[in-house]
Amino acid sequence: VLGTDAAGATAQSDRGTLALSAASNFTLGGADLAFGGLGSASAALTQVGSVDLSTIAGANLAISVLDGALSQVSSIRAGLGAVQNRFESTISNLSVTSENLSAARSRILDADFAMETAALTRAQILQQAGVAILAQANALPQNVLALLQ
């Protein structure tokens, strides 16, 4: 509690709720609070239940407390939105990478059927030509023997 003579000032904390009361006016200040690296919020009066709404000053204080709470919620939502956008970007990037990897793997593993059929036909023709030449080579000595008889 800053800016008070502390006469009759009390502070109670229960499960994250801070209740302040004092006999005179006081000013609040505090350290920065962080939420998972998503930004910081200033420690301030956060409980509207202890504010007297029957006076204009109390109502204005309640409005400023609510404005501060809304501002904190907005900045946390903005931080979460930024994290969500980064996740969506990463998911999109990984999806494109996966699709590209799958296409590259397919190009490597899939056979070009026209080219493979042409290569098979070529090999069969070469094999048949080799068999024909071998048959002619085997027939040549027999033809020579037939001429000698």
Image: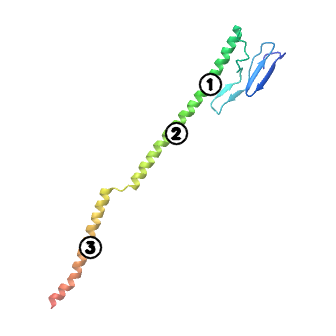
Relative placement, left or right, of 117 versus 79 is left
Q: Quadrant of residue 122?
A: bottom left
Callout 2 secondary element = helix
Q: CA distance from mark 3 to mark 2?
A: 60 Å
Disc 3 marks which residue? 130
Q: Secondary structure at mark 1?
A: helix
**Where on the picture, by quarter, is residue 76?**
top right
Q: Secondary structure at mark 3?
A: helix
On the image, the x and y values in percent for residue 57 come to 71, 9
Q: Earlier in the sequence, mark 3 or mark 2?
A: 2
The disc label shown at residue 73, or none = 1
The residue drawn where x is 49% and y is 40% is: 93
What is the count of numbered marks? 3
Amino acid under disc 1 = Val
Q: Are marks 1 and 3 in contact (CB under 8 Å)?
A: no
Mark 2 against mark 1, which lies toward the viewer? 1
The mark found on residue 90 in the picture is: 2
> Which of the two labelled residues, at mark 2 and mark 1, occupies the earlier sequence position?
1
Q: Position of residue 141 (x, y in %)?
A: 21, 85
